[in-house]
Image: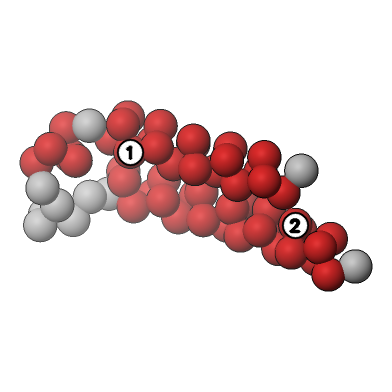
Amino acid sequence: MKEKMTTTNSAAAAATIAPVFASKSQASPPHTPKSSVHSPASSHERLKSTLSSLTKKNK
């Protein structure tokens, strides 16, 4: 029973975190280093791989 709850919670957390990260990377604050501003794709790929690894662990 507990395992099912954690799986659902992490899936819900991942679903909640993803749009937050997406909006943050699009609207970068002025103090963000230039390298990250120039490569939003790389941070997006990193986020995607993190999320996929999370979902794989849950399954």
Q: Amino acid at mark 1?
A: Ser
Q: What is the residue that sits farthest to the bottom in this orientation? A: 2
- Residue 24 or 5: which is nearer the viewer? 5
Question: How far from the left and from the top, in percent, is residue 6?
Answer: 74, 64
- Residue 6 or 19: which is nearer the viewer? 6
Question: How far from the left and from the top, in percent, is residue 48?
Answer: 49, 36
Q: Please name the residue shown 34% across and 52% down the image.
A: 24
Label 1, label 2: how far apart the Cα atoms are: 25 Å
Q: Quadrant of the N terminus?
A: bottom right
Instruction: Mark 1 and mark 2 in contact? Answer it, CB < 8 Å.
Output: no
- Locate residue 47: give its quadrant: top left
Q: Earlier in the sequence, mark 1 or mark 2?
A: 2
Question: How far from the left and from the top, in percent, is residue 35?
Answer: 12, 38
Q: Is residue 45 toward the left or the right of residue 49 in the image?
A: left
Q: Please name the residue shown 17% across and 39% down the image.
A: 37
Residue marked by disc 1: 43
Q: Residues within 10 Å of mark 2 (few under 14, many from 20)?
A: some
Q: Residues within 10 Å of mark 1 (few under 14, many from 20)?
A: some
Q: Amino acid at mark 2?
A: Thr
Question: Please, is residue 34 above or below residue 3 in the view?
Answer: above
Question: How far from the left and from the top, in percent, is residue 32?
Answer: 14, 52
Residue marked by disc 2: 7
